[in-house]
Image (cartoon, grey):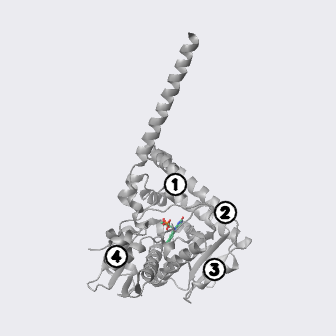
Amino acid sequence: MQNKNLKKGVKIMILGLTGILLAAVIIVYLASGGFLKAQYLEPWQKSYSDIFDDPRIKLAAHGILAANGHNMQPWNIKLDTDKNVFYLFADSERLTKEVDPYARQTMITQGTFLEYVRVAGERLGYKADITFFPDGEYDEQNLENSMNTKPVAKITITKTEPKSSSLYDYMFLPDTNRGAYSKKELTPEEIKQLHAILTDSDMTLEIFQDEDNKKNLGNYAIVGAKIESGIHRINQESANVFRANEYQKNKYRYGFSVEGQGTTAIMKHVLQGIITLFPSINNEKNSADLYVKSTQTGVDNTSGYAMIITKDNSRTEQVKCGMLYSKLILTAHSLGLVMQPPSQVLEEYPEMSEQYTKIHKDYAPKGGTIQMFFRIGQPTQKFPQSMRRDVMDIIMQ
Ligand SMILES: Cc1cc2nc3c(=O)[nH]c(=O)nc-3n(C[C@H](O)[C@H](O)[C@H](O)COP(=O)(O)O)c2cc1C
């Protein structure tokens, strides 16, 4: 009798625990928004641009897939009355002034967009002629007003025969992989193909795979991450655009999310649910520690680094650098390679100035500006796509 009661008790306990566990799983899943459709991923579908009749919007729908600083997607498009013309403006309401006080990354981000537009045009049968700053470069003393009034580029499209493009399909892959890369170095042939992209004599592309440079550059990445993660106002800026769950991701469709660290599937919902229910887990210290740790893992698993250096630091050069960066991403993808820019040491705020000067002394001793510094290699892990806005939201009325 006693034995029977004990067995019954154990059974009830197991059932009770299972119930609690199930309820916990459901609560976490609900908090994560796991049942919601991920609208913020719709622009990644190859058929996404088909719903638009206007070829300019079709092309812009490809542009928004480009890599961009802080995933702010600071792009505005103005459609001209001439149906073959549209303008790209930098969105002055989407600046990240703490990490990017001179909007240099924002300008590079204009270029990444333009290159995706150009590549999409080739494939869809629209030659895109790009004129940089058709109304002149910005007034630096009045930067935000300039962004609102002066286009970064005028894009004129001409109908052509659709061409098969070796790069088009790679636009639909995630641009940034922050994971571990394999130890395998880039082959001379791969390096040759990456160098072959560069046709502008005002820019250079440097690729480093030797131990000394790898050590030195890895160190820059780590020191940069450590400095940055210790600055409250910068942590705040990133935290403000962190989207903790599917509700927020669908609402804002820009900024950071757990996918940025490669978290997918059920783990994504577990993490999102927990962060939503217990936001203090994602506090400044924990996020900073995680960021430094993931930078260290990245550095420990990097077979090569690269840099884009421009002769001067004009707005046009910055935009052109962005175009080159996009082209490199697409070409890298075509070779089975991935990239990630640990940009911290290139950022122009006071606490970073010593590192900024040092890396320029080391790698651009004759002058010039290092615009992009990035890891490159073979991925060990597939990364998920990140949020993108609806293209109609970037069309200016
Ligand atoms: C100018 C520029 C600077 C960037 N800096 C960093 C960086 O410091 N660290 C990083 O992990 N990714 C960086 N990125 C990558 C963006 O964070 C990334 O493109 C954006 O979050 C969208 O994600 P996706 O590229 O995976 O689509 C940078 C991209 C650009 C264009």
Inspect the image, locate mark 3, and give the three-letter code of the amino acid beneath it: Glu
The numbered mark, 1 or 4, whose residue comes first in the sequence reads 4
357 or 158: nearer the eye? 158
Residue drawn at (52%, 49%), measured in percent from left and top? 267
Q: Earlier in the sequence, mark 2 or mark 3?
A: 3
Badge 2: few (under 14), some or many (20 or more) residues near its Cα, within 10 Å? many
Q: Is residue 335 left or right of residue 184?
A: left
Q: Quadrant of residue 162?
A: bottom left
Query: Which numbered disc, 2 or 4, marks the residue that appears first in the sequence?
Result: 4
| Label 2–label 4 contact, CB within 8 A | no
Mark 1 residue CB less than 8 A from any atom of ligand 1: no
Q: Which mark is residue 264?
A: 1
| Of 374 and 105, the residue lying toward us | 374
Q: Give the mark nearest the N terminus, 4 or 3.
A: 4
- Between 210 and 237, the one nearer to me in the picture: 210
Task: Determine if residue 162 is in view.
Answer: yes
Identify residue for label 3: 206
Whether 284 is drawn above or below 197: the answer is above
Discs 1/3, front: 1
Q: Which mark is residue 5?
A: none
The percent coordinates of residue 319 (x first, y second) are 46, 80
At label 2, which amino acid type do we have? Asn
* Residue 301: assigned label: 2
Contact flag, marks 2 and 3 (Cβ < 8 Å): no
Check disc 1 and report its element: helix, strand or loop.
loop
